Image: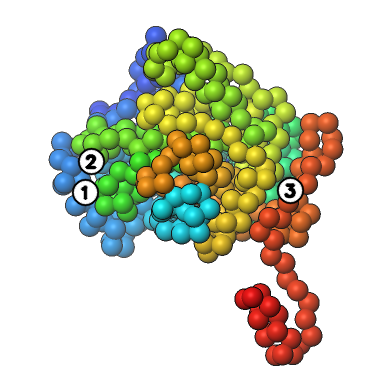
Amino acid sequence: MSETKKHSRTSVAADRASQHCIIPSCGAAFGIQERIYVCSQCGGPLEIEASPDAPRNASELRQTWEARGTAQNGRDRSGVWRYREMLPFEDDAPVVTLFEGNTPLYDAPRCAEYSGLRALRLKHQGCNPTGSFKDTGMTVAVTQAVLLGAKTVVCASTGNTSASLAAYAARAGLQCAIVLPQKQISAAKLAQAMDYGAAIFEIDGNFDHAMRLVRELAEEDSIYLVNSINPFRIEGQKTVAFELMQQCGWAVPDNVVVPGGNLGNSSALGKGFEELRSAGLIDRLPKLHIAQAEGAAPLAREFARLQTESQSKRSRAASDSALPDKIEFVEHPRTLASAIKIGAPISWRKALRAVLRSGGQVLTVSEQEIADAKAMIGRDGVGCEPASATTVAAVRKLTASGQIKRDESVVAILTGHILKDTDYVSHYHRGTLSIETASGEKQPIAASFRNVPVSVPATKQSVLENLRRRRE
Ligand code: F0G
C-alpha cells in the first residue's frame, strides 16, 4: 500500500464522517474518501456530515479552542485546524497550512453611521495569508488532495481562488492548474498565481465557461477539483463562523451579511452556524443575508420570486423541501466587482437553503452603492476589495427599508484585501470609474467620497495651508 493510501485510511475520519446528497428526495450517502464532487445518483450537491470526534460538551470545546489560540504549532495556530473536532479528519492528519484564519473583527463607526446603525462590525477575511477568505477552504481541500494522492489540483477562478490554490499547492508540492477568464482578473490576483508557480490558462470566456472546463478536467483520475463545489472547501470555510462566535464571546449577532458570487462562502457560513447550534455552542442562528451585484444576481432574482410566491399564497417562506429544482442563471453577468462576476453559481441551492433557514434575505446593490460603501470602509481604516463592499451597501439598504433596526447587531464579512484591486480604487477616487452597460454605453460611477493626491510646491507653508483648508 502506498504512503498516501495509508494516510488516507488513518487521517480522514472515515468512521464518523460521510458525504451526503442534499436533495431531500435523494439523500444518497458516500464514503468520505470517495473522490466525487456531486451525487453520483442524481447529480445533486454533496455536503459532509460528521459527528464531533469525541462526545464533548459545549464548554469543553470552547475551552479547548481558546487554549489553542496562543499555541505555536501549526495546527493550533491555524484558525481553521484549531477547530478540528468539527472537521472530517483524524487528529493526526498531515495538514497543509499557511496559518490561515485568525482574522480581525473590527468596530466600524463610520460605516455604522453610513448604514444607519448604532454599531457595525467588520470581520476581515481579507487578512488571510493570500489576502482572501479562500485560504480557509483551501487548507482543507489541499490537505484532502494530498490524502487522496492527487497529482494535480485545478480550479476556475475570478482571481482569489486561484491565488489561494496556487499558494497551497506550492506548499504541498502539488502541480497546480488554474483556468481564468482572460482580461477579467485583477493584475494583483494574477501576479500572485504567477509567483506561486501555477500553470495559468486564460480562456476566451467568462467564469462560468471556465468552471465548465475544470469540471471536465476533473474527470481525469489524477486531477482534483477544488472549487467550492468540492465539499471539503466548505468544511474549511465554515470555521469562520466558529472564529467569529469566539470573537463575539459566543453572543450571537442578529445579522451576518456576506457577498454572493459562486455562493460557496454563504453556504459555508450557514453550515458553520447550524453546526454550532447542533453542538449546543449557540442557541439561535443569526439571520444570514447575501449581497449580490445588480448585474450578477441570479440568486437575488430567485429569492424575490420566492418571496412574491409565498406572499401570494400567504404561506411562510419556502422550506428545504420547497427549494426550486433550478434557478434562472444570468448569461452575461456584469459588475466591476470582478470577484463576484458570476452568472451560474454552483452552490446556489446550499446558499438559498441557509438563507431561508436563518430568516435572512438575498438582495442586490448597485455599482454606485458598492463603490461608495467601499470608500466608507476605507474611511474606517479597514479597506477591502469591491466585492466585499456589497455587504456594507446591503446593510445600508436593509436598514433604510426597516428590515434591520438601528440597535440590532450586525457583522459584515469582508472577503478580500484592498490591495487586490487598486485600479478600481484609483479610478473611483479620480472620478474615472465607469461600467459598460448591456448596450455598450459607458455608465460613470460618481466619486462621492473622492480623495486624490494634490501637487504642491515643496514648502512647509503650502502643505500647512492645504491642511488648514481641509479642516475648514
Ligand atoms: N468576495 C471575494 C473577494 C471573492 O473572491 C469571491 C469569490 C466572493 C466574494 C464570493 O464568494 O463565490 O463563495 O460566493 N471569488 C471566487 C474566485 C469566485 O474565483 O476567487 P462565493
Residue 386 as seen in the image, left or right of residue 23: right
Front in this rendered view, residue 130 or 15: 130
Label 2 close to label 1 by CB (< 8 Å) = yes
Q: Count of labels shown? A: 3
Residue 144 has which mark?
none
Front in this rendered view, residue 409 or 320: 409
Image location (x, y in percent) of residue 118 = 41, 53
Image location (x, y in percent) of residue 443 = 79, 42
Give me the C-alpha separation between circle 2 and circle 3: 44 Å
Instruction: Answer few, some or many: residues within 10 Å of disc 3's Cα (few below 14, many 20 plus, some between 14 and 19).
Output: some
Instruction: Answer few, some or many: residues within 10 Å of disc 2's Cα (few below 14, many 20 plus, some between 14 and 19).
Output: many
Identify the coloring: rainbow
Residue at image coords 51%, 41%: 400
Image location (x, y in percent) of residue 103 = 42, 55
Instruction: Answer few, some or many: residues within 10 Å of disc 1's Cα (few below 14, many 20 plus, some between 14 and 19).
Output: some
Q: Quadrant of residue 314?
A: top left
Identify the mark nearer the N-term, 2 or 3: 2
Task: Locate ligand 1 by image quadrant.
Answer: top right
The amino acid on which the numbered mark 1 sits, given as a three-letter code, is Arg
Residue at image coords 41%, 42%: 405
Residue 62 has which mark?
1
Give me the C-alpha separation between circle 3 and circle 1: 46 Å
Query: In this rendering, is residue 455 above or below 225?
Result: below
Residue at image coords 63%, 51%: 372
Mark 3 secondary-structure assignment: loop
Q: Which residue is mark 2?
A: 281
The amino acid on which the numbered mark 3 sits, given as a three-letter code, is Ile
